[in-house]
Image (cartoon, rainbow, N blue to C red):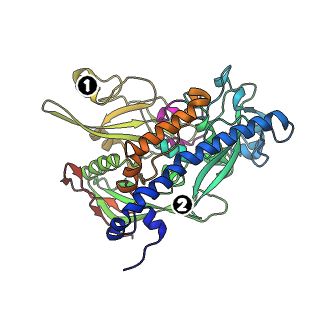
Amino acid sequence: MTMPTMKEIHHVKAGPLWNILCCPFTATIGLIYRSIKIYVAPCGGILCSRLGNCLWGTFCCCCGWPFKDKDFFGAAALGDFSIDDNSKETAAEMEAGTDWVRAKDLDMFRDKRPKLFQGDIEPADLCQGSVGNCWLVAALACAAEFPDVVRRMLVTKEYSPRGKYVVRIFDPIEKKFVKVTVDDRIPCKKGTKTPRFMSPKGQELWAMIVEKAYAKYIGSYASLEGGFTLWGWHTITGDNVFQMSVNEDGSGGWYREDMVAIDDKEDKRACGFRKTKEKFTGENIWTLLKKYDQQQALMSASIGKMQHRKTDGPSGEQILEDSGLIAGHAYSVLQAKEVSYGNDKFRLLNIRNPWGTFEWKGDWSDNSRQWKKYPTIAKELRYMAADDGEFWMPFEAFMEAYTRVNICDRSTDKDASLDVNESKGSWGIFCGFCCGCLNFWVCCKGARNLYCAHESSDLTRSVTEKKCCNCMCLNRLRYNQV
């Protein structure tokens, strides 16, 4: 019998026998260590940071206060938007029309203290700006369904009066997380205090800070133009990602492709896709969407573009007015639900447009008659009509329109984090600490994450609808790469 490492024992990955033998250790010392790492250490770090900022701002205000990131500023940070489209601005033109405004001076924070997080973290926090980075907005919107994922990205846990933030990004080539430091100077249109790029719906900073960190990591804001949601998820979580695409022969079948990172010094986002031998029917796609939704995976979808048209958007998006959809654009898939009303049964998908507006116009859209016809379904799905980019649509209509589905098979063992509760003021951190520990110990969240969490896998879930003890079985379908 091979002796497991301490890391395998600590994470309950040492095999059935060793996991049972070491259960007293992992269920006591292991959980205590986790709770200290998740709640105690960050809480202490935040309090020390507050004290340090107070002393620094009072006595050393002329030295490094506020923080200025000299490595990412000006024309070089904005980048050249005209490289792929001569009608767009060059780096010099963009810089001439841009003011770099501190977060506290933005219009959205007028007479109010900025917050890194305000209230709950949710997909509606994000709204795409003028740069064509719907791939990143969609990736972050999906991640925002699980607040712990977003909080783990931000090493800085609350608003920094010094304007310094650290964001954690997974490097696909180095296969490890790296830390990216940025300041809170936000690019705004000349003469205004309105952000050029990402602008959150509420009065919070995290979306703009994360976007700036990605721009710095990649090279510039212009480098964010176009991209893959899968790459975004991989760098957010470090977990396995893949996509399913419809066959171009019109047969209606689907196949799986795996993303492969490419070591390119000029382009950190360089990646390719390796086609596998796995094939799926439309019914298989529904089963997979439902199963991955149940295991809290991240999902998105897109519509293949037609030939270039004069009406195409600034980043190549093709607006389909009749349906209210957009081709060449990444959508977040938030939920896959089977609902019924009497003998009527429906398969519905909850989808979000990163633009925060322009929605599906067909059945089960915001203005659809179905919601009044089936009021219990509206109540079950917590339907609310709003022009927020989020909508429901039938799976059958989804299959007719969409040509690609992206999946991030997310690990859930680290779904616990300290909520600073900035909206509650200075004492919010203690409320977050107490509530977090209560949830971790009394409500058994720590034990669930340790023993019952899903681990990311490079295997596709089974497409067979099998049930065991009222739970979806965890059968896998191993794939063979071509």
Query: Which secondary structure lies at badge 1?
Result: helix
The magenta segment is 119-140
The amino acid at mark 2 is: Cys
Question: In the rendering, at what x and y percent does residue 34 appear?
Answer: 49, 53
Which image quadrant for residue 338? top left
Instruction: Note whether residue 94 is visible.
Output: no
Picture layout, residue 456 above or below residue 78:
below
How many numbered discs?
2
**According to the image, label 1 marks what residue?**
370
Say few, some or many: other residues with alpha carbon within 10 Å of mark 1 (under 14 / 14 to 19 / 20 or more): some
Query: Which secondary structure lies at badge 2?
Result: strand
Are dots 2 and 1 in contact, CB under 8 Å?
Answer: no
Q: Which residue is rendered at x = 26% and y = 54% of the image?
A: 281
- Frontmost residue, 79 versus 202: 202
**According to the image, label 2 marks what residue?**
271
Q: Which residue is rendered at x = 32% and y = 70% of the image?
A: 17
The amino acid at mark 1 is: Gln
Instruction: Note whether residue 260 is visible.
Output: yes
Which numbered circle lies on residue 362?
none
In which quadrant is the N terminus drawn? bottom left
- Frontmost residue, 121 versus 288: 121
Picture layout, residue 350 above or below residue 281:
above
Q: CA distance from mark 2 to mark 1?
A: 42 Å
Picture layout, residue 234 above or below residue 395:
below
Which image quadrant for residue 161? top right
First in residue order: circle 2 vs circle 1 = 2
Left or right: 474 as drawn, with respect to 390: left
Question: In the rendering, at what x and y percent does residue 294 appear?
Answer: 32, 46
Question: In the rendering, at what x and y percent does residue 309 appear?
Answer: 50, 39
Q: Which residue is rendered at x = 38% and y = 61% of the image?
A: 24
